[in-house]
Image (cartoon, helix red, strand yellow):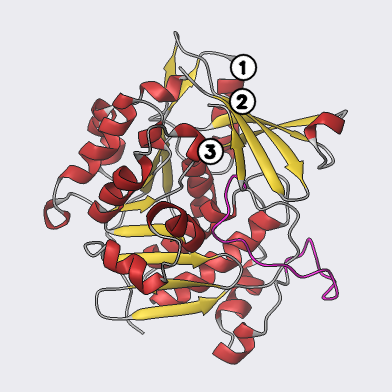
Amino acid sequence: MTAAFPLAPGPVVCIGETMAALAPEPPEPLGDATRLRLSVAGAESNVAMYLADHGVPATWLSALGDDPLGLRIRTAVAAAGVDVSPVRTDPDRPTGLLVKDPGPDGTRVLYYRQGSAASALGPEDLKSEAVRSAALLHLTGITPALSSTARDLVTAALAVPSADRAQPVSFDVNHRPSLWSSGEAPSVLRELADRADIVFVGLDEAQGLWGASLTPAQVRELLPRPRIVVVKDGGTAATALLEQRACTVPALRTTVVEPVGAGDAFAAGFLAGLKQGGSVERALRLGHITAASALVVTADHGPLPPAGERDRLLGLTETAWAAAHSAHPAHPDPSATSAASAASADEGPGEAGT
C-alpha cells in the first residue's frame, strides 16, 4: 500500500495549553474524594507525548506560569521525550488548572484557566525556529477559544493556502462548549477545520456543532478542502475520508477506566502512522491502538502496548481485527468487561468553568 500522506523529515510541533490536573484517586465523584492525584493535562502535549512514544520526534510549544505547577508540567512533558525548549515562562500569568469530577455518566471537567499564561499565546509564537523546522503543525479547536490572541495564532497558522505552506497543518476540532460564547463555535470551528490539511472530529461532536443527523460523508461535504478528514464514531469505528475514497476501520474493544485523553491519543497514533509512511488503514489502526492506551488509565497519558503487540495488531487480517479485543498489558484477562473504545472522547461529556 502507498503512503496515505507523505510527510517531510522533522518533528511534529504541537501548539496549545497544558494545565495542571487534579483528579480523585481512586476515581470517584469529586465531592466524595479524600485523595487527589496531581498530573498534567493538555490536548496538544498529549499528542506530542504519544508521538514521542511512537518514536516520532515531537515538540510542544506553549507558555507556562513562573510557578511550581508550570515547572512540574514542563518536567513531565520533557520526561516523555518531547522537546519543550520553545515553551515560554510568563512571569505575570499563572499556569492553568483543571479538576476532574468522575461520575457514572462520564468525567466532568472544571477549568481554572482564565488569564493563564497560555491564553497569551499569539501569532508571534509562530515565528519560533521550532515552527520553521517542523514537518507538521498540530493545532486544536481549544486554542482559538482561549483568547483573541490565541485565536489569531490559529487563524494565522491556517491563513496561508495549503499548497503554499511551509508545512502541513493538522487540526483536531476538540469542541469545548464551556470555552465558547454567543454561539460562535460552529462557524469558527468549521472555518478553521476546512483550512487544515488533516482534520480530526468526533461524529457526535460534528453532529452537535453542524447538524444532528450528519453522517461521516456529510461531514466531509462540510469540510471539502482538507486532504484527509478523520471522523471518529466513538467505539464503533473511525473513517478517514480522502479526496477520492473513504476508509473505515473498526475500533478495538477494551476495558474503559476513563475516556479522558483518548481522542488525543487517537490523533497521535494516526499522525504517527502517516509520519512513518504507512497507509491510511494502518494509520487508523495505530490510532485505535493508541486510544486504547489512554482508556485504561485515569491519567491523560497511558503506556503503549509493547512494540511486538502493536505489530501483531497492525498485522491482523481485516476479519481478525474486527473481532479483536485490546491485549493491553494492563488488562491481560480477555474476559474483562469490554466497552467502546472512545476514540472521540477527550475531556468527557460534561464541562464547567473556564
Element under label 3? loop
Front residue of 89/202: it is 202
Q: Residue at x 54, y 29 (%)?
A: 74
Front residue of 239/89: it is 239
Q: Residue at x 59, y 67 (%)?
A: 289
Asked if residue 341 lies in the magenta stretch, the reply is yes
**What range of the chain is rendered magenta?**
328-348
Residue 304 image offset from top left, x and y in percent: 64, 59
Q: Is residue 315 left or right of residue 166?
A: right
> Disc 3 or 2, which lies upstream in sequence?
3
Q: Which residue is mark 2?
A: 72
Q: Which residue is mark 3?
A: 42
On residue 312, the disc is none
Residue 181 image offset from top left, x and y in percent: 41, 32
> Disc 3 or 1, which lies upstream in sequence?
3
Count of all numbered marks drawn on residues in the image: 3
Residue 123 image offset from top left, x and y in percent: 24, 29
- Identify which amino acid the numbered label 1 is placed on: Pro
Cβ atoms at labels 2 and 1 below 8 Å apart: yes
Asked if residue 62 lies in the magenta stretch, the reply is no
- Identify which amino acid the numbered label 3 is placed on: Gly
On-image quarter of the N terminus = bottom left
Q: Is residue 6 visible?
A: no
Tell me how far mark 2 sits from mark 1, CA to CA: 6 Å
Q: Is residue 211 left or right of residue 193?
A: right
Q: In front of the other: label 3 or label 2?
A: 3
Q: In front of the other: label 3 or label 1?
A: 3
